[in-house]
Amino acid sequence: MSGRTATPDLALVQPGGAAADDALARGAALAVRGLTVSYGAAPAVFSVDASFPSAAMSAIIGPNGAGKSTLLKAALGVIPRLSGTVQVAGVPLDRARDRIAYVPQRASVDWDFPATVRDVVQMGFYRRLGLFGRLTGADRARTVACLDRVGMADFADRQIGQLSGGQQQRVFLARALAQEAELYLLDEPFAGVDAATERAIIDVLRGLRDDGRAVVAVHHDLATVRDYFDHVFLMNTRAIAEGPVARAFTAAALEAAYGGRLGATHLAGLAG
Ligand SMILES: Nc1ncnc2c1ncn2[C@@H]1O[C@H](COP(=O)(O)OP(=O)(O)OP(=O)(O)O)[C@@H](O)[C@H]1O
Ligand SMILES: [Mg+2]
C-alpha cells in the first residue's frame, strides 16, 4: 500500500513493495490487508496489513488498547470490518472459517454456563457435525486425547466453572486442538497461568507448529518473545513492524509501539 510510509511509525514496517507483499500474503497462513475496525468514532485497528506464516509461532505485540484482540476477532469474522480483506492460506475468510481455531482472552469468557470439561472440548467438533450431528466413538476418543495433551484428562466430568483459571485455559486449548485447525489464534494464552501451565501450553503450541500449523498469539511478556516465537507483529492501532523475531523485534519497534512507557534500559535488555 502506497500510504504505508506516510508517518514515522509506519516507516518501521519492513519495506518490500506491493508485489512482495502480495507474494507473502499468498503464502501466508493468515493475511489481512487494509484492515480497519471501529467500535465508535475512532478506529481500534487502522489500515493494518499483516501476514502470519504457516509452520511458525507468531506473536502479536502492543500495549493495552492497541487493538490486538480486535485484530484477532476481525480475522475470525466475529466482528465486522469497516474495510479490508482477510485471507486464510490464500482463501477468503468466508470460505475458510472452519480452518481457524480460537482461544479467547480469558477475562472475556463467562464461565457460568452449565457444561462439563468434556462438553467444552466437544464444542470443537460442532462446526463439522452441525448442531444435531452425533459424536462418533472416534470423536469421544479424540476428546480424551486432547484433554490428555493438556494434562486435563482427569477433569473430564468436572463443571468448567469449577476449575481454576489456569485449568480453564488448558481446557480451552484442548477444545482448539479438537478442531484440528490449520490456524490457531490465541489471545494471551499465558495470562495468569503458572509456570507449569505456561510450559504445558508452549509445548502444545510448538507441537502444532512442528506439525505445519500456524500459531498466532497475542503476547504481553516481552522477556519471552525471543524464546517462544519465530515471527512478530507489533502494532498500536496501526501496524508498526513485522517479520522474523531476529529482524523485527527491535528496540526501535518497541519504542514506536509503547512510546515512552518502556524505559531505555529495559528496551536495551529486551531487543536488538
Ligand atoms: N466492544 C467494544 N466496544 C467499544 N470499544 C471497544 C470494544 N472492544 C474494544 N474496544 C476498544 O477498542 C480498542 C482496542 O481494544 P482491544 O481489546 O482490541 O485492545 P487490546 O490490544 O487487545 O488490549 P489489551 O492488551 O488490554 O487486551 C480499545 O480502545 C478498547 O477500549
Ligand atoms: Mg486484548
Image (cartoon, rainbow, N blue to C red):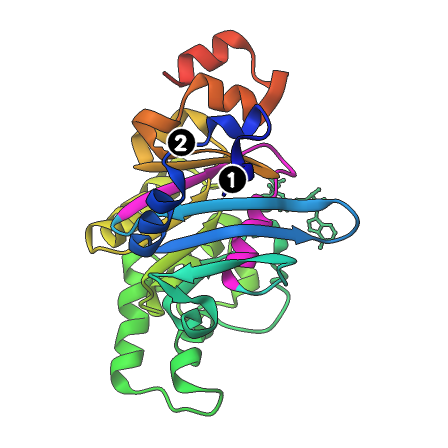
Name of the residue lying farthest toward the right = 41
Q: Looking at the image, do the residues carrying marks 1 and 2 touch, with CB atoms under 8 Å apart?
A: no
The residue shown at (28%, 52%) is 54
- Is residue 72 within the magenta segment? yes
Which residue bears the numbered disc 2? 14
Q: Where does residue 145 sit, x and y in percent of width and height?
A: 26, 67
Query: Is 110 or 2 nearer to us in this picture?
Result: 2
The part of the chain drawn in magenta is 56-76
Secondary structure of the residue carrying tag 2 is: loop
Residue 150 placement, left or right of 255: left
The residue shown at (46%, 67%) is 93
- Is residue 150 within the magenta segment? no
Q: Where does residue 97 sit, x and y in percent of width and height?
A: 44, 70
Name the amino acid, label 1.
Ser
Residue 83 placement, left or right of 49: right
Q: Where does residue 203 sit, x and y in percent of width and height?
A: 27, 45
Which residue bears the numbered disc 1? 2
